Image: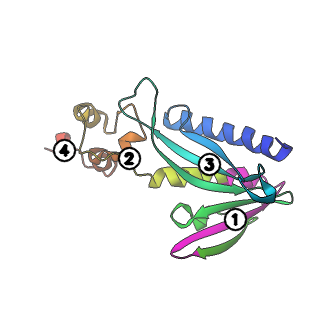
Amino acid sequence: MDAQSEILERECSKIFKDIEREFDYPDGTFSLTRNYSKKGKNIGKLTSTRININEFSYPFDENNKIAKSISVLLLKPNQRARKLVVREYNFAADEVPSSAKVTQTTQGRSISYNVHFELDDPAFFQYIRDTLFFCLRQYESSSSFVCCARFNKCSEMRKCVHPNKLYAKGCRYRRNLEHGQNFLLNA
């Protein structure tokens, strides 16, 4: 692993742990996946690194299976700069720091944004953090349900108390609570 990859791994690990702790998400909610070339003259060379959000199955099983994994950022290796590829639905223009250069690419109906940073730009890792927060705000659970058996406690607390916070994003009652609609207290 080269020095840039080590820095990326270390800094992303810190970001992942901070967000997991802040939102009470389980370890492994975020991950890095390295993609290597499988053919041609670049066989075995790193082509990209994905940053993923992983939703674990509920109820938890002995293997703690991942029910859903989505790629939110794609990092392209480059010795002179840092390049992130962000899909249109994960891109928040107001989150891009002024030090970054952005270009748009289109493939068929798919739109992506290339966000370029200088190697030593401290805004790079802050942008990753900000993008993860943006993606979590937009996140749709792999399951959708009206409510669970905890709805009385959720009503008392005025917030969702489900232990699997990412899975709970599929709860419709949680959405109502977040918009100030508490059916038990409003009755």
Q: Are marks 4 and 1 in contact (CB under 8 Å)?
A: no
Residue at x-position 80% and y-position 56%: 42
Where's the C terminus, which quadrant? top left
Single out the mark in the foreground, 4 or 1.
1
Q: Which residues are magenta?
A: 107-127
Q: Are marks 1 and 2 in contact (CB under 8 Å)?
A: no
Quick one: label 3 or label 1, which is nearer the N terminus? 3
What secondary structure is marked by label 1? strand
Residue at x-position 19% and y-position 44%: 183
Q: Residues within 10 Å of mark 1 (few under 14, many from 20)?
A: many
Q: Which residue is mark 4?
A: 183
Single out the mark in the foreground, 3 or 1.
3
Where's the N terminus, which quadrant? top right
**127 vs 46, nearest the viewer:** 46
Q: Are marks 2 and 3 in contact (CB under 8 Å)?
A: no
**157 vs 165, nearest the viewer:** 165
Quick one: label 2 or label 4, which is nearer the N terminus? 2
Quick one: label 2 or label 3, which is nearer the N terminus? 3
